[in-house]
Amino acid sequence: MSREMARSVKLLATLPLNILLNAILIIPFAIMIYLAFLKWSPAMGIDWWEAAFVGVANFVRALGDARFVNALTNTVIYTVSTVSIEFLLGLLLAYLMLGEFTGKKAVLSLIIYPLMLPPVIVASVFYLMFQPYGPVNNVFLRAVLGDDALRITWFLNPRLAFTALIIADIWQWTPFIFLILYSALSAVPRRLVEAAQVLGASSFTIFWRIRLPLIKPLIIVAVVLRALEAFKMFDYAYLMTGGGPGVSTETISLYIYRVSVLYTDISYAAAMSLVVLVMLALVIRLFIWYFFERVR
Amino acid sequence: MTCCSDNVDKSDPAPEGQSSRQNSVDKARRTFLIALGTAAVGIGVGYALGYLTKPAEIIRETVERTVTVTRTVTVTPTPTPAPTPIPGLSGAASRAIAGVRDLLNKGVIAPGTTIRILHVAGSRANLEKAIELWSKYVPEVRVELITLGTEPDVYTKAMSEAVTKTGAFDAVTIFSTWLGDIVEAGLARPLDEFYARYDPEYVGPCAPIEPLGSYVTIYKGRRHSLALDSDVFTLSYRKDLLTSETYRKEFEAQYRKPLKVPDTWEELIDMARFFTELRLTAPSGGRVWGAYFYLEPAFAAYITWFNIFVEAGGIPFDLETMDPKVESPEGRYAFDIILRMKPYMPPEAISAAWADLYDKFVKGETVFTAAWPSLTKEAMRPTSAVRGNVGTALMPGVEVEVGGRRIVNKAAPNPVNWVGIVSNYSAHPEVAYLFLQFATAPDTGLDMVLTGVILDLFRACWFTDPRYRAKSAEGYGEEFLDAYMRSIEISYPDILIRGGTEYLSKLTTEVNNVAAGLKDPERALSDISAEWDSITKKYGRDAQLEAWRALAQLFPENVKSVWRAKGYMK
Amino acid sequence: MEFRIVTKALKYIVIGVFALWTLIPLAWIVSLAFKSYAEWRVSYFVPKNPTTDNFVLLFKPEELLGRYGVMGATAIIEPATKPLINSLIVTAATTFLAVFIGFFTAYGASRYRAPGPFTLFFTLLTRMLPPAIFITPIMVYYSNLGLLDTYFGLVFLYSAVTVTYAIWILKGFIDAVPVEWEEAAMLEGATPIKVVFKVVLPLVRPGLVVAGLFIFLLTWSELLFALVLTNISAVTLPVHISKYVGAVGQLFGPQAALALIGSIIPVAIGYAIQKHLVTGFTFGMVRG
């Protein structure tokens, strides 16, 4: 096969994307990077192009900022917990939903419903549900633990507050992984599946040994995309716990938001964002190298 | 499945006989040029689209704006307009309308001009009322509202505007706490000139009650805003519980003190304890707690701590050096009171949002609480479980020694007061100011304040003048008014110098840490001190000191006299 | 035999449990939409005094002037119809643009490694940035371009940040299409463009659908950029939801009501595309 690219295809493949990204993102991105090397905040009364250049001072400050490190740690723990649980649940569900059954369309619509809601409303709803006067304590836990359940205060205890956030995330985002995996699993060539069935393989074996390996790239895509989103989680922390108690559930997005919006310390926020960016980029790069390039 | 391998040549993978260094350099250069080219094309496309898709009216308005500006230059500066009293309007409102009329007649602004006001959703009813009244007198000038959901949204938009200077709105309603930031960012126009020209009645029997009238509008000695609101805390309590004979006897037996409205925090703690231990049940089914004061982490925890701190005679920054002075006996005392009060407050006080305090009180689940005047209004609704049983008093104070005498020093917090500022990038600053003056005038202002919940009375005559008092009483209840007026007289501002939000936000986090048991008070105080100091350094010690000195002068007299007694102030 | 029945039963039980888990918070949202203020902070699901006031407030706020008994929320916001329409326009445009660009990029990336690895990585970078810090730069940029408060401004920004999804998901699907099928088509005389449209495109339909759906959902509920980049004309649904804040905090009832109404369109789309989530590669598709 001639590997020479058809001009038209190559053009379509690269030009639109380039125009879009370059036109929209490059300049703000460049501005943001530049801001990170300045000492500037709108409240200083000077324009940003007049502000003083301070080199890597902001970055050094970020690395030594205990609250920054705390936010990062919280976010990492949060991301790892939610993504792994969502992956397992999503995979299980995708497997179970593979066959046909009555009412499947309705059940599928229900399962993916959480994706259709703005995270803002999900956060508000879980906020109300986890309050001491809410149903989680008074109805569900009470059934299991009796009146002891009434003494659990979710948002007063750092660990419980964290758990509440994770639960909200799992509720809303498991369908994301489920959907990708489900469509990927369904796209596995039917003849392969039929061939294996003829050979007497159980549905589980088919799943484990045929479908799963074939969709591995999409698994990676699903996990990476979800992890990137989870890392940026803001709404739940903002609306359910406010980062509290203290700063025990403050995620990096929330901290950067506070620094850039409330404290208007934009240069510092930009520096922190870049640090986060570099960290994530490294992790993703390693991840991709490991899964895509090492195993041939 | 491969991707992103560095071994692959970027632009063309056909490997046979094509690899030479010169070739790859050419390719790199080509790629760079292509990227540059597409960026230029993209930006060009963006500009074109931006211009073409602007709604026609905005393009017309931009053109009009240019025309207007040119015309203003050729007109001699307007002398103070002879006050043409408008029948039925008070002085300030009348002058505002006359001013607008004047500008219209002189052609400085054209009929059909629109003023845009950025504000928060909660104040929409109030502003719409003001617009309704305004349109009766000046229908040629339209006022449009840009509504945002929450205060941080307004702050974000305002600060963004300070950077981008788009002129998308002419006035903003902001929290007094942000005044320093907004002024220093260059967004808030100084209004002394307009005050002098149009006299919004800030002196006289109908002036905004001092010291509030001054400290929410004056920054570094100049006027930058008009007050829209007062937001002074009062102590709200359950009258029925406090006047019940049974409880009086029991309390007296237990504590050997009369059960009355507490004058000091110490007294309040005892009473709160008493009621909490009774384990009463509210009509809602929930437990009744003795007290509920703000300790939540999002923004309000500082209010309680700062209140006790100031009453005890504490001063946040040294007046000579701008050093934080929180690691002081007053700071420790404030934490002491909070920790002793905590067992008698519902556990949610430390985590739930600020509306939770309202909810609990209105449901009858707290005995002593303190919040903005809107709490009293809420408690008066037919749906409230405590309707008719709410008493209002001054915030409890702290016993201090002044001039050899022991007195109870009371001061009321005024957190986040709404004020209106005019944008420096507005095309019609004068008209925007006149609208604000009209909306806050003695007569029209009262209508505006009473239509809605989040704005409250701030002019003295609204309490004292019989013409206005009846209306006010309808909104708040008679007995609230006197206590509230007195509270305003002893009220003090947030730290509204530049970085104010940051100072207070850091304070809130630490207070919440202590309340949640995550930090001990000493450590918290030293952390607050360190954090405040770094904020001060960021903005420049001298600049902050200048602003703080100006602000400290605007604190109420009783607070200042304690500062003098302690040597914090000369 | 019994083993099969047990596993089948188990399968339905697990699905049922998950459906229930999904249903409960959803039921809470529905109940909030029919509750008045006094019943928002409670533990029971079924309102004792159900009301449709929340919905009325969304579309006919004038009817509730003064009567709306929610913590004095006489703050009457504009009806939610315009934000709904705005959201629909912006989201649909974004989805089409992003999927269109993403598909071709993914094809190029999968078959020809163009665009190269750095560009692809850059697209991932767009998802790694905490949005809060991007606000000021994008505001500065857009205000200079005159794209503030316009449909185009939002659509371009959203497309730029969501095209990653399209690229990566579609690349995964395209990778799975055997190159030989394309070669076969070309041997039969099809031009490269035709190959793309007639061979590859139908086979990755689930990918298109999934990517499209995600981009739709992400954009439909995006709040932060919409808040900063719109004022009056291009206000979208999430921004409008955020305006339902009364004098005393969020108005959970109207927000829940609007969220429900706002979810109707995505749900309808989700339901309609279900059959496209599954293709199954079958013989006989490679023709002409």
Image (cartoon, rainbow, N blue to C red):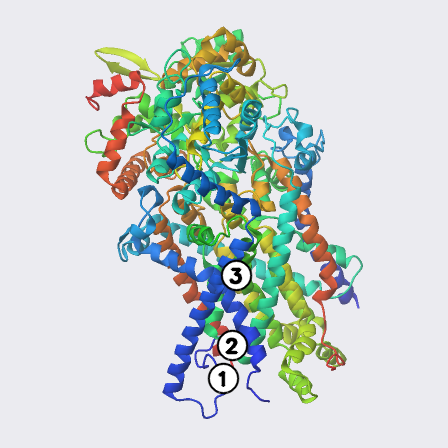
**Residue bearing mark 2:** C114
Could you tell me how far apart the alpha carbons at marks 1 and 2 are, in whole angstroms? 9 Å
**What SS does tag 2 mark?**
loop
**What SS does tag 3 mark?**
helix
Foreground: B233 or B400?
Answer: B233
* Amino acid at the residue labelled 1: Pro
**Residue bearing mark 1:** B13
Foreground: B543 or A245?
Answer: B543
As drawn, B121 above or below B200: below
Q: Chain of mark 2?
A: C
**Residue bearing mark 3:** C160
* Amino acid at the residue labelled 3: Ala
Q: Residues within 10 Å of mark 1 (few under 14, many from 20)?
A: some
Question: Is residue B371 something one can see in this rendering?
Answer: no
Looking at the image, which residue is at 40% across and 24% down?
Answer: B414
Q: Residue furthest bottom?
A: B17
Q: Say yes or no: labels 3 and 1 on the same chain.
A: no
- Residue C239 picture location, percent across and down: 56, 44
As drawn, C63 above or below C108: above
Dots 1 and 2: beta carbons under 8 Å?
yes
* Amino acid at the residue labelled 2: Ala
